[in-house]
Image (cartoon, grey):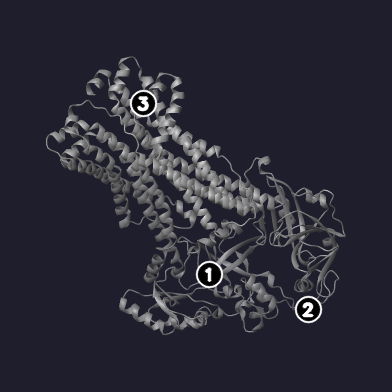
Amino acid sequence: MFSITLKLMKKSARMLIPAGIAILIGTAFIAATFLFGNAMNDALAAQNTAQLGGANYVISPDSGKDLTDKDQDYIYTRTVNDFQLDRIRATEGVKDARASYAGSVTVTRGNKHASSYVITTAAKRTLLPVTITQGDQPADSNEIALTKSVADQLGVKVGDRVTVNSQAAQYAGKTGDSAGNTGDAGDESAQNADGTSSHDGDSDAASGASVSSDGANTADSGMTVRVVGLTDDPNGAYAYYGGASVLSDNVITAMAGSNDFGNLPVYLVYLDIDDASDTAAASTVKQVSTLLPKHFSVQSRAALVEESVKSMSSGETSITTIFLLSFGILAMLVAALVIANTFQVLVAQRRRTLALLRTIGANKSQLYVSVLFEAGVLGLIASALGVGLGIGLMAALCQSGLMKATGMTMRLVLSGPVFTVPMAFGIIMTVIASLGSARSATAVTPLEALRPIELTDTRRAGVVRAVISVLLIVAGVALCAFSVWQMSENIAGRDSMADKQYPLVLLAAIIGCALIFLGLVLSATFWLPVLMRGVGALVALAGPSAKVAHANIQKNPRRVAATGAALLIGVTLVSTIATGAASAKQTMNEALTTRYSVDMIAAGTDMTGKQASEAAKVKGVQSSIYAPTRMMTMKDADGKSLSVLVVGVDGVDALRKVVRSDLSGVTIDGDSVLMPKYSAATGKDIPLDKSVTFTAGAAEAQADATNGPSGNDANGSAENGNGQSGGTQTLTLKPRKVDYRRIASNYAAVAFVDASHFTNGGIKADGHIMLMRIDAEGAGVALNDVFTNVQNVFSASAGVTVTGPVAERTQWETMINGMMALLVGLIAVAVLIALVGVANTLSLSVIERTRESATLRAIGMTRGQLRRSLAVEALLLSLVSGVVGVILGTLFGWLGSYMVFSLYGDTVFPFEWATNGVVLGVAALAALLASVAPARRAVKTPPVEALAEA
């Protein structure tokens, strides 16, 4: 019987190809998902151990032991001196040892600044986690190997000098808690990189700054170092920071705000041990272990890699794999509908053959097993090809280097599940999809061998299916209605389950949508043929070809429903995601617009007027103002202290150009201050007295008095540069409240005063702010481009940040667009399989209507009319299912948007014309293409031959 089955498969190979393609695509997706997970695990494991560099052993805290808080404190307060590096390096078998310490510094050359992550150096390049691409690693004092990106940004090369600084260094220099107080720093830090003396007194090695001859602290000047090399980070050890620069020991000590490298806190030491002999390496490890602090041990690199992979196997990569795998399963479910269609027609076509087999002795079980065996063979062959395709696609992705943009270098990693899971899933799904056809095969009687073949399936869908479908839809609608009711109650401020159990309410909405969708798919055999009959009746008025297509599509409602349901699944999901994404963007845009009164804000202590002028010229910046600022404090009418950013402006007319608020009837003069109605911190009304007093903190005023431009002495007199005494700056004004919001969200309020208070010495500015109104659409540029260009203007100033609704809107849109592209791309696999199903349905229709097509040709239908009839049939199948999917997906998207985004503001319910139009257009185009091959077959066979064949 099996040999007969294989011969029947060979004869029907052309019919099996579309079903095989559907299986192939689904299994390729599943195989690629496992390969992607393997590559992610491998890349992350390599990334997690990339900081080891060439180290083959690591000194690290003990793991897997019950450590007390005291033990933890002990571990994380160890310093370089505690590890006795000199003795470890002197141990036989140890080639090199590197204590791991890292931090961030600002690198300056001229008027250009850049931030860089920095790490300690090593005697040998192999122990560094980064690669020295040019020059050498720092070995002597005052040396740095810069990342290539920072070097390019600053325009420096090997041999140039740059200035490095850090907050720790500045703090140490100002407080004197550094090498400047030790008196034993020596010449190592007393000289700059060029060998010239930096001062006449003691060196401030910790901050890299100096104390001038008159005793004034100049800690902010930084430390001049020589660039001895350029680094690259090929393994992504510091991908989050864009790579890492390498500093000589004295420089990284200074940047840490310390005066002795041995005092730097470390808890990891990387070792390069000669492991040519396992016995010798074990002996070396044992000797090194005796030199370590308690709770520390030596671990091999191989053991670390194994632990890293084990920790990730239940972490983010498994979540990613499961997420992607769910779409692979979806693709296989859609493929199952295509497969079921194929085997239904195969069994119907072979009815006479099956009847003849019954007459010569084949029993029902043999016919049943024959159909399942054929499905298993098809599943096996298509799944094997799918696995091969998945491996090929993943290999191409790894070779293309596209993932390098994420900071990871991925490679092809094969494993057992890559082969077993897709093939098992493909075979099982194919066999399950053929069960109904196998049951139909057992119903064939020997007498049917003598009857004429009638392939039209006139069976009606069962009552049980109808009842189950209705129950699912009713339950789904009830859950969705309940969720919407609870959310509306919550928004109205009434007692609601959504207030305390929001996740459960959201889950109820999701389950409700799933039940509605499942009910509609199960009941598609009832409503989809009726819908197509109605649409087809209108289309039939277009001419003979359309009339024939309308008649043909009604002959097999079950197959039409299965094909339409397959396409419905993919289109609905795409439309849901597109609608949700559009609603998210528009809802958040409106929420941001109501919560911000200024489109974009740039603020910082090192902003310059020249930068502000350049930013004002950026295309898309409609108007702007550049103003001095000072952070001050005030007390409201209730006595609560508020942090306020005081901004000096040239009258209210300047504000009207950039602030989106009603400023009519408002003035700003020397005696008044413009205050917001609501606090940016709490959102509540700010109660104010008839006058408010702004105060600059005593510590800030003391710093101004010490280092200010007024020429006060270094001891910081009680009188500051403004002539105010008591170590504070105060300003008392009459408040005028206006409802403007979140000018700068870091402060409870932003107050606008007349700029004269800054120019006449009443307030000393400690920064500047630039307020901008954006009109990207009017300028014909993208919002993201405006934001990026403004950021680029201020890139030279490390302390300037660009914020505002435009920035947040850009981040939201970038994130949403990225997620949408990913999800739509994944679901496109299911849509592709569904379109293969359309082609399959047309092919099978042509095969089973051979005599009918021949008769139509014999009575005068032209080849063109026959082709058009199949094209119309394909369009009816795809567009009717597609339109239903778009409507259903839009409703689901609106519901999801309401459930999620109503928490942030008034939800927008858009109809995504562009995406839905593209989906329907692709479906229509694919349907027309799918009709080409079947139409060619239909018109190729001469009518006489077709009649004889039938």
Q: Which mark is residue 741?
A: none
Viewport quadrant of the N terminus: top left
Q: Which badge, 3 or 2, comes first in the chain's sequence? A: 3
Q: Which mark is residue 119?
A: 1
Q: The disc labelled 1 sits on which kind of residue?
A: Ile
Q: Which badge, 3 or 1, comes first in the chain's sequence? A: 1
Mark 3, Cα crowd under 10 Å, few <14 / some 14-19 / many 20+, is some
Q: Which mark is residue 715?
A: 2
Q: Residue furthest left?
A: 360
Q: Quadrant of residue 49?
A: bottom left
Query: Residue 545: where, in percent of width, then height?
Result: 40, 21
Q: Residue at x 27, y 39 (%)?
A: 437
Relative vertical location of residue 802 with respect to residue 872 in this rendering, above or below: below
Q: Quadrant of residue 754?
A: bottom right
Of tags 3 and 1, the one toward the viewer is 3
Q: Give left or right: position of 909 versus 773.
A: left
Q: Which mark is residue 552?
A: 3
Relative vertical location of residue 943 with respect to residue 139 in this rendering, above or below: above
Q: Which badge, 2 or 1, comes first in the chain's sequence? A: 1
